[in-house]
Amino acid sequence: MTTDFQSKESAAETAVYAKVTWRLVPFLFLCYIVAYLDRVNVGFAKLQMLSDLKFSESVYGFGAGIFFIGYFLFEVPSNIILQKVGARLWIARIMISWGVISGAMMFVTSEWTFYVMRFLLGLAEAGFFPGIILYLTYWYPSERRGKITALFMTAVPLSGVIGGPLSGWILQNMAGTLGYAAWQWLFLIEAIPALVMGLLVITYLSDGIVQAPWLTENEKILMQKRIKIDSEHKEDHSLRQVFANARIWLFALIYFCFVMGLYGIGFWLPTIIKSMGIIGTFNIGLLSAVPYAIAVVGMVLVSRSSDRQRERRWHVAIPASLGAVGLIFSAVFASNTLLAMAALSLGTFGIMTSLPLFWSLPTAYLRGTAAAAGIALINSLGNLAGFVSPYLIGLIKDRTHSTDAGMYLLAGSLVLGALLTLSIPAKSVNR
């Protein structure tokens, strides 16, 4: 009888989580595609923007990266506000405000306006990603969260699959329309989805299990029970303890190492492909979609393996190491387009796969207010690499006229992140 009851309960749980996933993940996925596209489309705008505005590679790198200073400053407060006012209204506010600022990037005319607009864009978008990671903890227990986070984060490479050809087409076909440059149209057109999705958030999302009108009472009880059981295995901390917790700072350092690789690829991939001798912005856009498409498949397969085996550390460390190998060989074979693209694809796969699985580490460790603040702190500190990475690569390219040394630097960062991941005790994160 007990076995039959457990079997029925398991079937009911599987059904309700499938229902929740179909309701939430595709929508959040679309939101993140829009977020990431607006964050890195400056990498495509760069192909024309620099010559029009007479910017150096260092100016571009600094402007691309200063986004993350604004992001850093408002990340923790944003997540705490989200927990207090509810995810629905706060995520809508984030998306609408960054859509407005992203569109206003078309009016950049000087180095300082470039810096200010990128900083404001980071300030506006701060809290979106850690807010969603926190939001998923309201719905899913730890053992289900690896796959769900990976599904959500496949939006990053898919934004490259979609955004690369789209951005290339805009740059190739919109020049001079109504008197504006093609890169100006790029910022304007790609900002519109953020405004639309921001308005939809208000009517579509629920703040949590209790507020979801599309769940039955029995489904709500079952899910709340699972979340309660999951929370019993986590540590609760005050805000002061969060900032004083060495483990959280270790998580932040690991994430910093991985984000170095992410934005090295995100902001410089079009430039790297162009340096291989590829002509035409649309062709560059099409080729840039290839590494991201491969990464999508890898993210889903590796995350499923991690959830099935209830193993986290090696599923993070091995892809990160493969990412390092890919970046190194992309520089070694830079003169051979086919081999360089294969290496870039391996590098992108490794970087993109390690990132969603990384989040299974801190979310298995924290709960409550500590989760809100801890996730935001880890993400904000880690994303400072989004400033460091493009700026360093810009400086290196200005001095060496090549991105090779930059790729080696990013590879070293990924290896360090992999080693630090393996230093975490398995029993604290393998759930």
Image: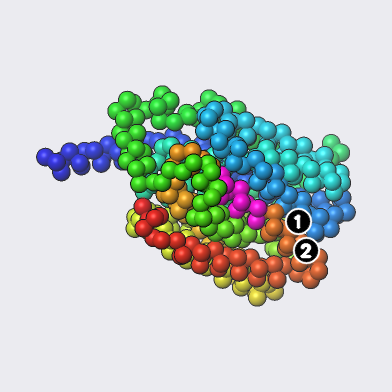
> Is the magenta region chiefly helix, strand or loop?
helix
* Residue located 41% across and 46% down the image: 235
Type of residue at label 1? Gly
Whole-percent x and y of residue 262?
61, 57
Q: Assign a secondary structure to mark 2.
A: helix
Please tell me how crowded label 2 is: few (under 14), some (14-19), or many (20+) other residues with Cα within 10 Å: many
Residue matched to label 1: 61
Q: Up-down: is 428 above or below 8?
A: below
> Is residue 5 one of those drawn in magenta?
no
For disc 2, the marked residue is: 395
Q: Are marks 2 and 1 in contact (CB under 8 Å)?
A: yes
Q: Is residue 288 above or below residue 275?
A: above
Q: Which residues are magenta?
A: 374-385
Q: Is residue 218 above or below residue 298?
A: above
Q: Is 277 placed left or right of 357 in the picture? A: right
Model colouring = rainbow
